[in-house]
Image (spheres, grey):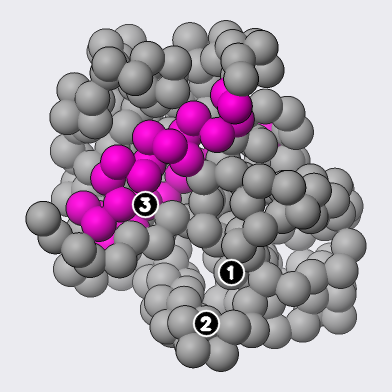
Amino acid sequence: MNFKSTTVIAVTNQKGGVGKTTTALHLSTALSLRGFKVLAIDLDPHGNLSQGLGFSIDQVTSGIQHLIRDRAVTWGQSINELHGIHLVTANPELASVSKWIASTTNGELRLRQRISEIRGVYDYIVIDTCPGLGALLNTVLNAADHLLIPVDTGIYGYMGVKELLHEVEEIKLGTNPTLSIIGFVLTLADRTVVSRQTFQALKDQYGALVFESQIRRSVALKEASLIGQPVFTLDPESTASWDYQKLTHELIARLESAKTNHIIGETHA
């Protein structure tokens, strides 16, 4: 048995279109490039993380929805290996799991229970989440150790954070008291006044929890998504590749610091 410590990071924001999937994909692959053993879990019925790594969701025979609902389904049956990481896929069938979770005793804890079976196998487990609040999001909040929250440069992405933080506090008061926020990252950044104002607003509100790394708008990211591969493979010299490598470096340093200083995760909505 390998008793390495496993860190579970959920990439989440209740607003869609802020770069959650892109961030989850590139964080997973960047960690793998640094020599870590990584499992990525797609928890969005659209299956964008799966497709972004080149996996056709029509081929899903045992995905995250099966692991959550059926204890007899094993991780070994559900894991695919792509681009140096292990992946558990999702497809539209996952949407029906929300109703199952809501009607099942401790349904929102099932993902945490399943992940406990493989703690120690991976260095990092990275979970991509679907937009919106509800049972699927709460399932993730109960399973995660840390949250990484992408915020785009529009006002609605920033406003959506407050709704998410309210849900986080409720989960911390109840079923996952050790849940923490590892940080906020500005995505779709550019040289506009709005982009600078959004970043400053985040800094004013959340201080040191805001990553200095920003993810700039990039054609390479769009091309990589269409082809189904990480930007590190498609264009390793692109600004997007640099931005996500820088974010990953900053995140690892923050996690290491948090182990001794206990400074992350305190926010005020």
Tell me whether the residue at label 1 lies in contact with that at label 2, contact meaning CB atoms closer than 8 angstroms.
yes
Which mark is first along the chain, 2 or 1? 1
Q: Name the residue that disc number 2 marks.
A: 258
Nearest the eye: 128 or 158: 128
Give the left or right position of residue 11, taking residue 33 as reference: right
Taking the spot 68% from the left edge, 77% from the top edge, the residue there is 209
Residue under the point 79% across and 75% down: 206
Can residue 179 be seen in the rendering of this structure? Answer: yes
Which of these two is toward me, 120 or 191? Answer: 120
Q: Residues within 10 Å of mark 1 (few under 14, many from 20)?
A: many
Q: Is residue 109 magenta?
A: yes
Q: Is residue 28 above or below residue 87?
A: below
* Residue 125: mark in rendering: 3
* Residue extent of the magenta highlight: 106-131
Taking the view exactly as shown, the residue that stands out farthest to the left is 1
| Residue 118 sits in quarter | top left
The amino acid marked with disc number 2 is Ala
**Left or right: 198 in relation to 215:** right
Local SS, label 2: helix
Residue corresponding to mark 1: 182
- In reply to whether residue 133 is colored magenta, the answer given is no
Q: Position of residue 25 (x, y in %)?
A: 40, 48
* Location of residue 208 by image quarter: bottom right
Give the mark, 3 or 2, whose residue is nearer the N terminus: 3
